[in-house]
């Protein structure tokens, strides 16, 4: 099995003992992304909607670095600080994915790093 580490300079650097993404054979596993703007090192201003857009941008940068796109995504996991943001998630999600949609899990968690409102990870296959 071929395994390679992916790191995009356009997305926030890993801040712990993990990689932005790992490709194993034809599958990429992208670690959970927070709404950090790499230019400022801070969360984007605004609420859940703005944070979701930044998370998807960060995911896109990493996918692109490895030669993948949102069209290759087969599974997403969405962690929400407030499940009341589920409707907003669906609205934003539809801007990045089209039918046939990837499989998805979305749930509320007790807390996210740096008090983020959202974190998302993806798995994509070529």
Image (cartoon, grey):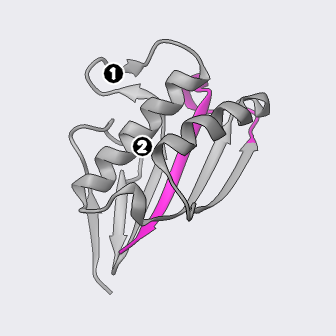
- What is the x, y in percent for residue 1? 33, 87
Q: Name the mark on residue 16.
A: 2
- When asked about the image quadrant of residue 84, the answer is top right
Return the x and y of residue 45 as percentages of the image width and height.
Answer: 47, 12
Q: In the image, 4: left or right of 37?
A: left
Q: Residues within 10 Å of mark 2 (few under 14, many from 20)?
A: few
Point out the residue furthest to the bottom here.
1
Q: Is residue 14 magenta?
A: no
Q: Is residue 13 left or right of residue 99?
A: left
Question: Which quadrant of the view contains residue 118?
Answer: top right
Residue range of the region highlighted in magenta in the rendering? 108-126
Which residue is depicted at the point 27% across and 58% down? 6
Image point (53%, 13%), residue name: 46
Residue under pointer 1: 41
**From the viewer's perspective, is 79 left or right of 66?**
right
Residue 15 visible, this angle: no
Q: Relative to 64, say whether 92 is above or below.
A: above
Q: Is residue 23 visible?
A: yes
Q: Residue furthest top?
A: 45
């Amino acid at each position: 099995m071929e395994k390679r580490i992916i790191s995009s300079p356009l997305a926030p650097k890993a801040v712990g003992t993990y990689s932005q993404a790992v490709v194993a054979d034809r599958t990429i596993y992208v670690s959970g992304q927070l709404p950090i703007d790499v230019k400022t090192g801070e969360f984007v201003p605004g609420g859940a909607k703005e944070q979701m857009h930044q998370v998807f941008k960060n995911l896109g940068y990493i996918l692109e670095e490895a030669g993948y796109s949102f069209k290759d995504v087969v599974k997403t996991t969405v962690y929400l600080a407030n499940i009341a943001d589920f409707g907003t998630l669906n609205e934003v999600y539809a801007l990045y994915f089209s039918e046939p949609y990837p499989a998805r899990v979305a749930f509320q968690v007790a807390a996210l790093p740096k008090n983020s409102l959202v974190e998302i990870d993806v798995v994509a296959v070529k």
